[in-house]
Amino acid sequence: MNAQLERNRAILKKYIPGPAVDPIANWIYRYDFKLKIKRGRATKYGDYRPPVKGMNHQITINNNLNAYAFLITLVHEIAHLSNWEKHAERVKPHGEEWKQEFRSLMRPFLSEQIFPQDVIAALNRYLQNPAASSCTDLNLQRTLKRYDKMDGLRLLEQLPQGSTFVSGRRHFVKGKKLRKRFICRETRTNAQYLFNPLAEVILVSLPLITE
């Protein structure tokens, strides 16, 4: 029995649905990449770095993703690795070649043994034209967040306009929606910021109701 494969499986079992463990463990062994689990990062869910100076491929994934989001992000980054091995830097990172690679690698996981029906439906829609980040597809992101452990957090879009909330230790008041984002006012400085509707925030108070 391959010891490296067993180590891969033991790690992956903590982060992704059980039926996906063996194929992903085999990919790690086959592609010989270094998988690093990182603390949650606000700007990205994962990233890929090609081999330099004799080093292995490297993929990092945030540790605070739910099992379904973790798996999708990991396959997204493995698609970068596979695409790089085929084309190196001759194609765009999220060009048509990567999209085809991501679709191909993702397709075997579109099973109810791995994902709930609502996630499969959202994924099928997203895979028609996958973007640089699944974060940009609000339908997929909204569906995945149903499976997050919110621990007292709320999605900004769930709060009424005028609610006060905390994000990053700062207090804001939720304003109107401008196209895809909400404009919110920081209470201390009165500066205005645009927020993703799926931003996870702490509700402080609801708006006052006046007659």
Image (spheres, rainbow, N blue to C red):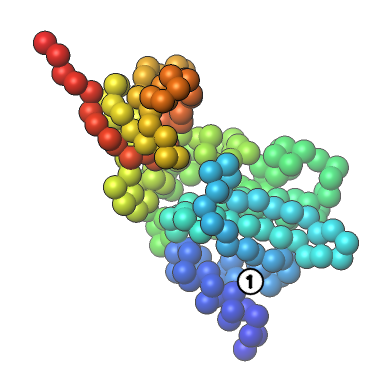
Q: Which residue is mark 1?
A: 26
Image location of residue 208, percent across then percent down = 19, 21
Q: Compare residues 185 and 26 and report the one nearer the observer.
A: 185
In what quadrant of the picture does the C terminus appear?
Answer: top left
Task: Give the left or right position of residue 176, taking residue 40 as reference.
Answer: left
Residue at left offset 41%, top offset 30%:
197
Q: Compare residues 187 and 65 and report the one nearer the observer.
A: 187
Residue at left offset 29%, top offset 47%:
152
Indicate whether 62 appears above or below 33.
above
Q: Amino acid at mark 1?
A: Asn
Task: Give the left or right position of residue 81, taking residue 5 as reference.
Answer: right
Q: Is residue 104 visible?
A: no
In what quadrant of the picture does the N terminus appear?
Answer: bottom right
On the image, which quarter does residue 169 sit in? Answer: top left
**Count of all numbered marks drawn on residues in the image:** 1
Q: Compare residues 208 and 141 and report the one nearer the observer.
A: 208
Residue at left offset 84%, top offset 58%:
52
Q: Residue farthest to the left?
A: 211
Q: Residues within 10 Å of mark 1 (few under 14, many from 20)?
A: some
Image location of residue 51, percent across then percent down = 81, 59
On the image, which quarter does residue 127 sit in? Answer: top right
Image location of residue 137, percent across then percent down = 50, 35
